[in-house]
Image: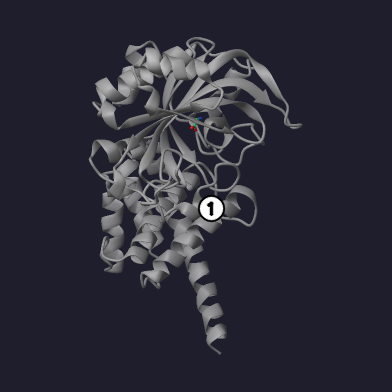
Amino acid sequence: KRFLDYFKKNGHAIVPSSGLVPKGDPTLLFTNAGMVQFKGVFLNEETRGYKTAVSCQRCMRAGGKHNDLENVGRTARHHTFFEMLGNFSFGDYFKEGAIKYAWDFLTNEMRLPKDKLWVTVFETDDEAATIWKKSAGVSDDRIVRLGAKDNFWSMGDTGPCGPCSEILIDQGVEAGCGEPACAVGCDCDRYLELWNLVFMQYNRSVDDKLSPLPSPCIDTGMGLERLSTVLQGKKSNYDTALFSPLIHCIETLSSVKYGADRENDVSIKAIADHARAIAFLMTDGVLPSNEGRGYVLRRIIRRAARHGRFLGLKEPFLYKVNAMVVELMGEIYPELKAAASLISRATKGEEERFFETLERGLALLEE
Ligand code: GLY
């Protein structure tokens, strides 16, 4: 709410989250970022009654581009389903405006300590590096240049894209891998990427050619879960108030304590993440099946059920964790409440079928 209010105060229109299934866009499996619902605006194929916008967008990163599924449970920061905070400019402000807003919001509104923040820019983007130094006062040694893998963002194989600049927070040596080479850009949890500012300048076509957008635009993305972790003084997204009721629910169902054993923790975190993904995918009309989006959902349900088995759960349980997701998030997303009984029935049915198959398979294996 504070993010939305900050940008509203600065002239942005608050735009509600769209669903997880992109409307009329066959190039994407799921909405994977806040910019997806604005794709046509970036390409000048669609106009809206505003030139700047802000949203809190529900996103899914499983299957297709930006797929985090196999990392979930193993790190403190990866999710299949998450909520992305973003501000957007459609031919209004560009690099300078985006950097000023982001720095002001994090350091003045959220009061994050400047001495723990780092920024990255695309390796050839001198302009962004200069703005960070001159407008935000970030010193040269805190501005790191990285290549396209880290600092060039694309929504998918085709569509709007551009160089980007990230703001990271140093969570301390103890949060990291401890390797001597650990630095900004390392995959461990020490330098946590908080906010990505994309300087949207190109459209990528199917033959991989980049053509300039009608006007330079801004697309930013900051995970609500990561920001919560930092503000609540935690080291893992799963230890924040967004997840602890779900973790507690899984502890109660399985009688396994969170925080006592590394492998059990992986299972508990994976189930907590997947329960949110399952509830929101079903709310947005996806049901388990053998192809496309439905198949990704089926894999998520089975992955969660398998982790449940590792915790000793031999009966359907996931639908009960889903009920907790509805309780936690139903006020903000009334559509979730409306879909509650569908979510419960569809998840339980899928779990029952999976457990039966698993029992039969394991019996054969024993024989
Ligand atoms: N669209 C910006 C991001 O997802 O990081």
Estimate the x, y position of residue 245 in percent, counting from the top left. 26, 51
Residue at 31 percent across and 25 percent down: it is: 106
Can see residue 82?
Answer: yes
* Type of amino acid under label 1: Leu
Furthest toward the bottom, the residue is 367
Which residue position holds label 1?
297
Residue at 34 percent across and 41 percent down: it is: 330
Estimate the x, y position of residue 199 in percent, counting from the top left. 53, 21
Q: Which one is in front, 193 or 179?
A: 179
Q: Which one is in front, 271 or 123?
A: 123
Estimate the x, y position of residue 154 in percent, counting from the top left. 59, 31
Q: Indicate how the structure is coloured in the image.
A: one colour
Element type at mark 1: helix
**Quarter of the C terminus within the rendering:** bottom right
Q: Which one is in front, 37 or 148?
A: 148
Choose top left, top right, bottom left or bottom right for residue 13: top left
Estimate the x, y position of residue 248 in percent, counting from the top left. 26, 57
Choose top left, top right, bottom left or bottom right for residue 57: top left
Specify few, some or many for label 1: CA neighbours under 10 Å numbering under 14, 14-19, or 20 or more: many
Residue at 61 percent across and 16 percent down: it is: 46
Q: Is residue 252 left or right of residue 218?
A: left
